[in-house]
């Protein structure tokens, strides 16, 4: 079906009204939308809850829905819109202790299948660009499966529908 805006839709499940997926248009399913990079989390600032160093064996659920400035002041509500399935983000570890790694999963998932960023010594600042799958509430879970600990920052550069 083509709507009045010229967007092509495909019905993937029957019913009333059925389940429709956008195939083309400004926000087609799976389309990447780049944004001006913005901070969505910084464990060093008390503005964010929870915050603080992520220790060995700990995990932390984080919402990427809203953006903040570098001081932790809210800037944009729904910066990552409802319906986003993933984000492309820059993940930075800061004030590392020992060596270690973090895994980043969809919100609520604490199982570890691969690392998302690694560090090899105390006092490092390292960053990694990575696509991160979101849960339905636009959350991720950061898991420290290593013996080290660290603060970390997440800046979003775009999202997928």
Image: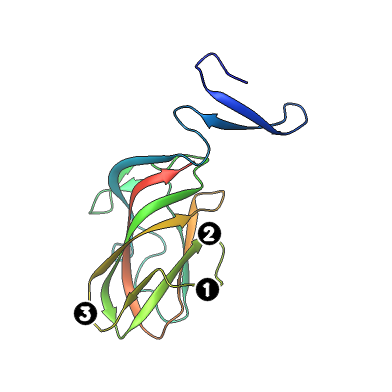
**Viewer can see residue 77:** no
Residue depicted at x 22% and y 76%? 124
Q: Quadrant of residue 2?
A: top right
Judged from the image, the secondary structure of the residue bearing numbered disc 2 is loop
Q: Is residue 77 left or right of residue 39?
A: right
Closer to the observer: label 2 or label 1? Answer: 1
Of the pair 20 and 137, the residue shown nearer to us: 20
Residue 90, x across and y down, in percent: 31, 58
Q: Earlier in the sequence, mark 2 or mark 1?
A: 2
Closer to the observer: label 1 or label 3? Answer: 1
Judged from the image, the secondary structure of the residue bearing numbered disc 3 is loop
Residue depicted at x 49% and y 43%? 84
* Res 130 label: none
* Res 123 label: 3
Residue 61, x across and y down, in percent: 48, 62
Q: Earlier in the sequence, mark 3 or mark 2?
A: 2
Residue 131, x across and y down, in percent: 42, 56
Of the pair 67 and 14, the residue shown nearer to us: 14
C-beta proximity under 8 Å, tags 2 and 1: no
Judged from the image, the secondary structure of the residue bearing numbered disc 1 is loop
Q: In the rendered image, which residue does mark 1 sit on?
A: 112
Give the vertical position of 61 relative to 31 (above or below): below
* Label 1 Cα neighbours within 10 Å, binned few <14 / some 14-19 / many ≥20: some
Q: Is residue 128 left or right of residue 82?
A: left
C-beta proximity under 8 Å, tags 3 and 2: no
Q: Gap between marks 3 and 2, in whole Å?
A: 28 Å
Q: Gap between marks 1 and 3, in whole Å?
A: 24 Å
Q: In the rendered image, which residue does mark 2 sit on?
A: 107
């Amino acid at each position: 079906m083509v709507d009045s805006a010229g967007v092509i839709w495909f019905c993937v499940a029957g019913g009333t009204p059925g389940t429709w997926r956008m195939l083309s248009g400004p926000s087609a399913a799976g389309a990447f939308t780049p944004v001006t990079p913005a901070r969505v989390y910084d464990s060093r600032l008390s503005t964010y809850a929870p915050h603080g160093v992520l220790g060995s064996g700990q995990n932390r659920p984080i919402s990427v829905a809203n953006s903040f400035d570098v001081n932790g002041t809210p800037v944009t509500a729904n910066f990552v819109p409802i319906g986003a399935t993933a984000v492309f983000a820059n993940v930075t570890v800061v004030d590392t202790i020992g060596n270690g790694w973090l895994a980043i999963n969809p919100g609520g998932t604490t199982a570890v299948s691969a690392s998302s960023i690694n560090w090899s010594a105390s006092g490092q600042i390292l960053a990694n660009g990575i696509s991160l799958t979101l849960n339905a509430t636009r959350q991720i879970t950061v898991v420290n499966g290593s013996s080290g600990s660290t603060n970390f920052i997440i800046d979003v550069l775009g999202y997928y529908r």
